[in-house]
Amino acid sequence: MPDIFTAKQVPHSVEAEQAVLGAMLIDSRCVADVIGALKADDFYIDTNRSIYETIYSMFNYSMTIDPVTVIEQMKVNGSYTEGANDYILKLMEMTPTAANVAQYVAIVQDKALLRRIADAGNEINALAMAGTGQADEILDVSEQKIYAIRHGRLTGGLTPISQVMVDVYNKLTEAAKSGNRIPGHSTGLYDLDNAIMGLNDSDLILIAARPGMGKTSIALNIALNVARSTEKAVAIFSLEMSREQLCTSLLSAESFVERKKLQTGVLSDEDWKKVGAAAVSVGGMRIMIDDNPMLSVADINAACRRVKDLGLVVVDYLQLMQSAGGNAPKYNENRTQIVSDISRMLKIMAKELNVPVICASQLSRANESRSDKRPMLSDLRESGAIEQDADIVLALYRDDYYNKETERPNIAECIILKNRRGETGTVELRWLPEYTSFASIDRRHDE
């Protein structure tokens, strides 16, 4: 075995790596804390990485961890080399105390981060100097690499299922402790929450409807509830409505003052009190709006990467977006293919950002010719691969939109056309047209 105690390579700390391993061998009670903070790739020295991977595997199988069992397990998994016994004993001898393991871990993390920054810088430099590809494309790739580093996720690569299992088990434990009935963010519409299990990280949720059905309204309702209940940032990208129109809608939904009054300014004293309280409430939320009508997915992705503690992204609406490359569609381009590319990029964005992404989508007129005008998946306008990329597809239908004599006015059907987290079906909601808002069926606006 080479003498790695005096090895000088950049950037890493031999002493910190050895101290982390020594602490784990001295006191197995700190193993869980270390495994929750470090990955095997955080260790620069191959021997240290092999020992850590062995301990990691043993921890997953609830095996006893001490110098003897670790050496034996290294023999079993084939990572044992000549001199490993002496090296492990030396690790324990040179570690002053296991009590300082958190400080040792912090040093290893810092050095690993510096290495990843250096690697990303080299890759970005190579891309720029190669002279191939557009500058915007290289910039987008560069931002992705830096974003992945900042959020502790490497782009690509195989992950051992043992590591994934730890993550899943930790989430399960957190969910059990919290007592939440759904794993994701609440939409504020509890019947819908029960059906789709809330809004979960990396999910692409499509809200599809014909014009006037309220797809923008329900998306804003959900955004308002997520911002209020989680205190996380919510990014809204509106390609159709101005930021002032969106803000008016949010204010009406929060204050329960008719939107028409907010547009005309004809408000009673009581209305002013409600609007004032709602303005303070909504103004204190971390809601950000971009109403640039020329946005592409790359633009949205780049903007969202710069938002700290992002909880939700809302895009309104898909068919108005620029093509995947950020260019205006050419006359002879296949619009179905363009929309399919956009939907695919939205799903990739949801995974990269690791937050739920809600995207409104226009339905075609196909349902207008049917006797039953309730939407179907095939009604997605220029659908292409939209229904394949989306994790959840919700379609809105109001009978009073087509039938003014309906026996159930202001009742909306939220039809779950696709649901990777559960069953499909229909959830009934109350439509509050004066506030352009939705509510659970038994809720009243005076609550």
Image (cartoon, rainbow, N blue to C red):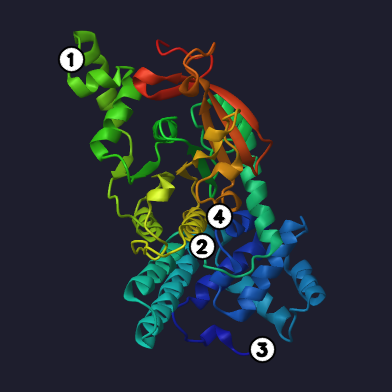
Q: Position of residue 192 (x, y in %)?
A: 57, 29
Mark toward the viewer: 2 or 1: 1
Question: Is 444 on the left-hand or right-hand side of 389?
Answer: left
Query: Which comes sooner in the sequence, label 3 or label 1?
Result: 3
Q: Position of residue 342 (x, y in %)?
A: 46, 57
According to the picture, the residue beneath numbered tag 4 turns out to be 384
According to the picture, the residue beneath numbered tag 1 turns out to be 266
Query: Which comes sooner in the sequence, label 2 or label 3?
Result: 3
Residue type for callout 4: Gly
Q: Residues within 10 Å of mark 1 (few under 14, many from 20)?
A: few
Residue type for callout 1: Val
Residue type for callout 2: Arg
Q: Position of residue 28 (x, y in %)?
A: 67, 58
What separation in Å lies between label 1 and label 4 (alpha carbons)? 46 Å
Tally of marks: 4
Q: Quadrant of the N terminus?
A: bottom right
Q: Mark 2–mark 4 contact, CB under 8 Å?
A: no
According to the picture, the residue beneath numbered tag 2 turns out to be 153
What separation in Å lies between label 2 and label 4 (alpha carbons)? 31 Å
Q: Residues within 10 Å of mark 3 (few under 14, many from 20)?
A: few
Q: Which one is nearer the viewer's eye here, 89 or 237? A: 237
Name the residue furthest front.
369
Query: Which comes sooner in the sequence, label 3 or label 4?
Result: 3
